Amino acid sequence: MPHTSRIARRAAVAAAGGLLTVAVTGLPAHAAGTPTIKLSTAYLSGAVGASGDPAVTVTVAQSGTDASALTVTASASSKTSVAQTGDVTVSGTGATRTVSVAARAQGYTDLTLKVTGTGGATATTKLHYAASKAVQNPADTRYLTGSSDASAAVDAGGGYVIVADDESNVLRLYNGAVSGAPVKTWDMSSKVGASKEMDIEGATRVGNLIYWTGSLGNNKDGEYKADRNTVFTTTVSGSGATTELAYAHSYKKLRDQLVDWDEDNDDRYGFKDATADGQAPKQIDGFNVEGLEFAPGSTTTAYVGFRAPLVPPANGGKALIVPVTNMDKVVASGSTPAFGTPIELDLGGLSIRDIRKNAANQYLIVAGSWAADDNSDPYALYRWDGVAGHAPTKVRDLPTTDPGGWEAVVSVPDLTASGQSVQLITDNGDADLYGDGTEAKDLDHDEWKKARTVRFTVS
């Protein structure tokens, strides 16, 4: 006896490789096959007013049917104030489609995506979407997802950038021109022998060798953590999307040597007291390294830039750089560090959050507060020639109303040419990106974690 009614069924699909539970409805008994819909990731982040937000890849299929005949649409939103079905764009044909979302407001919504196949059979899946609020300069802003605590960056060529995270020991390669997830990652923990975070805060590149430094300070509770007392190097091969990193060497006594050097110079900067048990690093008289760059024309003398202390440790104090004149040998062979004459820079009462130079020895310094409340304190960009005794000059103030603290300079353009811009990256770890009171570093899904990269005119 022939069937006279339609059959409703549910098919459970194992959660693997981004597959989600798929609901299938409206399948006639005589249909050739059941359509399927799979997401490259179940979680996606966007921003209100953003240009080129991250997208998700959707793979669809139905046995006995050409994939180009299948249609993909957004059929429902759990919170239409954040994004409606009409805010979802599906592009592409065939088995692979791209789905993007234009956010209306900050918050979360679950978007139901539906594929319709032969005979009207459908399958659905959920995309869990989070939207951060609008920021200044949206056209010049991109979002680096997968981590929120960007802390140092190095140019990899072709618009690509290697980014460090101060909450993990993972280095990530991004296409800095677009928003999205890292292209490649390298976890340096086992290579360096670190069981805890190194609190990577500074980096610089010399040829095909990249130097990375931990903060060298105590943790926020004033406890000494040995892994933070690490400087290490990686070698680079390839460039752009083909970039590869390999661990080279590490040195784990620079903090100790700095303290001894300061004691030998009449405790000029108070390093011994600042590194004592119970002393938090982000104090005006604290001990915290955030910048690393080499002296003009040198591949041996490294400038170690301090977030704390200010010198003297009072409002209006100067930023501190301590040159390590044999940094190449220190890291490569464990030589005892030799220190040059310290450099004190007037950055308007701010300290060093990053320092970077170009081949012409033109330096840019990201200046910010020594304090821990990164998301509201002043920030500024300064230009310098790298010569002790020469004063830096302010290029511009940096906006502070958007989430995140300015942490990294990717590269320095020719500052004598007109219309040049510089790419800066924020640490968003402490930011409440989605308005629910959760700090970005504590979000459940890495896809919702993100740092922000913005271009600013500097010449």
Image: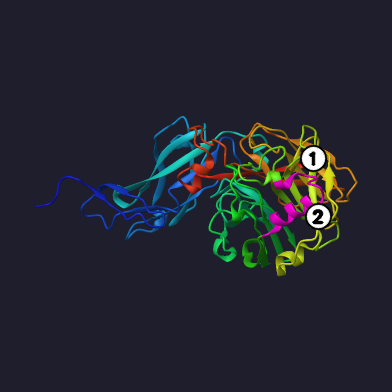
285 w.r.t. 63: above or below: above
The answer to whether residue 39 is left or right of residue 370 is: left
Real-space Cα distance between discs 2 and 1?
16 Å
State the residue at coordinates (46%, 41%).
129
Query: Which residue is rendered at x = 85% and y = 46% of the image?
Result: 384
Q: Identify the residue position indicated by label 2 in the image.
A: 323
Q: Which one is closest to the eye, mark 2 or mark 1? A: 1
Q: Secondary structure at mark 2?
A: strand
Residue at 84 percent across and 48 percent down: it is 343
Q: Are marks 2 and 1 in contact (CB under 8 Å)?
A: no
Give the left or right position of residue 129, taking residue 154 as reference. left
Residue 421's disc is none
**Could you tell me the amino acid type at mark 2?**
Pro
Q: Position of residue 73 (x, y in %)?
A: 41, 43
Query: Is 25 in front, or is 132?
Result: 132
Give the amino acid at mark 1: Val
> Which colour style is shown?
rainbow
The residue that mark 1 highlights is 311
User: Quadrant location of residue 314?
Assistant: top right
